[in-house]
């Protein structure tokens, strides 16, 4: 079997177009513009690239983008004061504090100071608890993107065996909660799971989010399974820099029914879902119906 390639780049463009259309309607019918504030502390080069991309995508869909770039030595008190001022600002519907933060700042305290209704990353402990108990919440962007692609590919997910490899708070755990919410039978596996190959081989849906380059190989994939590769690993091969996922693409694609590539799979969905979450937050804040197909 040669797997269908799930084109995350094209799907993300579709999601962004849906968001843009809804934003245009909000402007026309309600005189409202969703706003996203992104806070970057320090000069981490990768973070600077992410923040630049977020700004460009936010403006492109017609939202207001508020960028706050602070020096690496910013005090915790100053950062908390900024977050509180964004919480109080009615033109800001979503707040994202770019991680990682410099070591002297308490990330948990800062994230948990964001108004949960504006926590478009879905990292606030209230949102984690709401998701875990099946209540309406803000959902982390990467797992939300994976869920959208899975729903698009499969239609209903109920009854399917899903294995999530990886137990991070940002991807693995919320991904498992979302799949459970769609009535999958869910297993969370990780790097220390016994007989990992055998566990993975039971999966109709296999989500790899373990952060180890090409760890999931074709012999671990059930024939016909859908494989979602969340990994983004920079490696060097034959003297060249290369981006690979957590899945060994060639061997897995030979067995799977469908697979996301790296790059061009899950990656582009993350920013698209950040925009979707900002739109959702704006609608909720104004007592308006939520955008269809863009929430969990
Ligand atoms: N750093 C890398 N990815 C992310 C993300 O999704 N959200 C935040 N806040 N920081 C990040």
Image: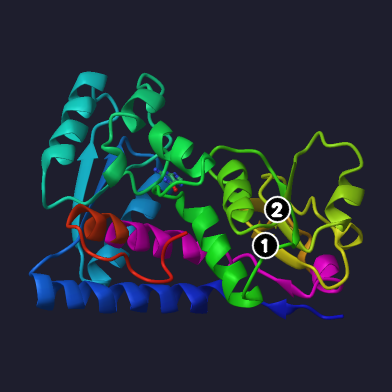
- How many numbered marks does the figure carry? 2
Q: Quadrant of residue 116?
A: top left
Q: Quadrant of ligand 1?
A: top left
Check disc 2 and report its element: helix, strand or loop.
Answer: strand
Query: Between marks 2 and 1, how big is the CA–CA gap?
Result: 6 Å
Q: Which residue is mark 1?
A: 228
Q: Is residue 241 visible?
A: no
Q: Is mark 2 within 8 Å of ligand 1?
A: no
Q: Quadrant of residue 124?
A: top left
Q: In screen coordinates, is 38 left or right of 202? A: left
Q: Quadrant of residue 216?
A: bottom right
Q: Which residue is mark 2?
A: 208
Look at the picture and state if 8 lies above or below 267. below
Q: In screen coordinates, is 192 left or right of 48? A: right
Q: In screen coordinates, is 132 left or right of 183? A: left
Residue at figure coordinates x 41%, y 67% from the top left: 294
Look at the picture and state if 212 lies above or below 111. below
Looking at the image, do the residues carrying marks 2 and 1 touch, with CB atoms under 8 Å apart?
A: yes
Foreground of the two, 27 or 158:
158
Residue at figure coordinates x 41%, y 40% from the top left: 127
* Residue segment shown in magenta: 250-279
Image location (x, y in percent) of residue 12:
46, 72
Q: Is residue 265 magenta?
A: yes
Within 10 Å of disc 1 (Cα), the crowding (few <14, some 14-19, many 20+) is many
Image location (x, y in percent) of residue 252:
82, 66
Check disc 1 and report its element: helix, strand or loop.
Answer: strand
Image location (x, y in percent) of residue 146:
57, 61
Residue at figure coordinates x 50%, y 79% from the top left: 10
């Amino acid at each position: 079997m040669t797997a269908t390639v799930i084109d995350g780049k094209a799907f993300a463009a579709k999601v962004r177009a849906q968001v843009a259309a809804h934003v245009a309607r909000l402007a026309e019918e309600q005189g409202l513009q969703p706003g996203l504030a992104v806070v970057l502390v320090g000069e981490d080069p990768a973070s600077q690239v992410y923040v630049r991309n977020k700004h460009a995508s936010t403006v492109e869909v017609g939202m207001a983008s508020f960028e706050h770039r602070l020096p690496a030595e910013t005090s915790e008190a100053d950062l908390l004061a900024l977050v509180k001022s964004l919480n109080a600002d009615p033109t800001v519907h979503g707040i994202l504090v770019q991680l990682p933060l410099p070591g002297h700042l308490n990330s948990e305290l800062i994230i948990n100071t964001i108004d949960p209704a504006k926590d478009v990353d879905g990292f606030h402990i209230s949102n984690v608890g709401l998701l875990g108990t099946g209540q309406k919440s803000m959902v982390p962007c990467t797992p939300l993107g994976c869920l959208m692609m899975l729903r698009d590919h499969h239609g209903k997910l109920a009854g399917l065996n899903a294995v999530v490899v990886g137990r991070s708070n940002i991807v693995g755990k919320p991904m498992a909660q979302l799949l459970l919410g769609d009535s999958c039978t869910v297993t969370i596996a990780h790097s220390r799971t016994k007989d990992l190959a055998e566990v993975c081989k039971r999966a109709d849906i296999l989500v790899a989010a373990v952060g180890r380059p090409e760890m999931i190989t074709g012999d671990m994939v059930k024939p016909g399974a859908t494989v979602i590769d969340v990994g983004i690993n920079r490696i060097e091969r034959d003297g060249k820099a290369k981006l690979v996922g957590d899945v060994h693409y060639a061997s897995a694609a030979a067995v799977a029914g469908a697979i996301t590539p790296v790059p061009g799979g899950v990656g582009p969905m993350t920013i698209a879902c950040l925009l979707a979450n900002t739109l959702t937050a704006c609608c909720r804040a104004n007592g308006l119906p939520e955008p269809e197909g863009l929430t969990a």
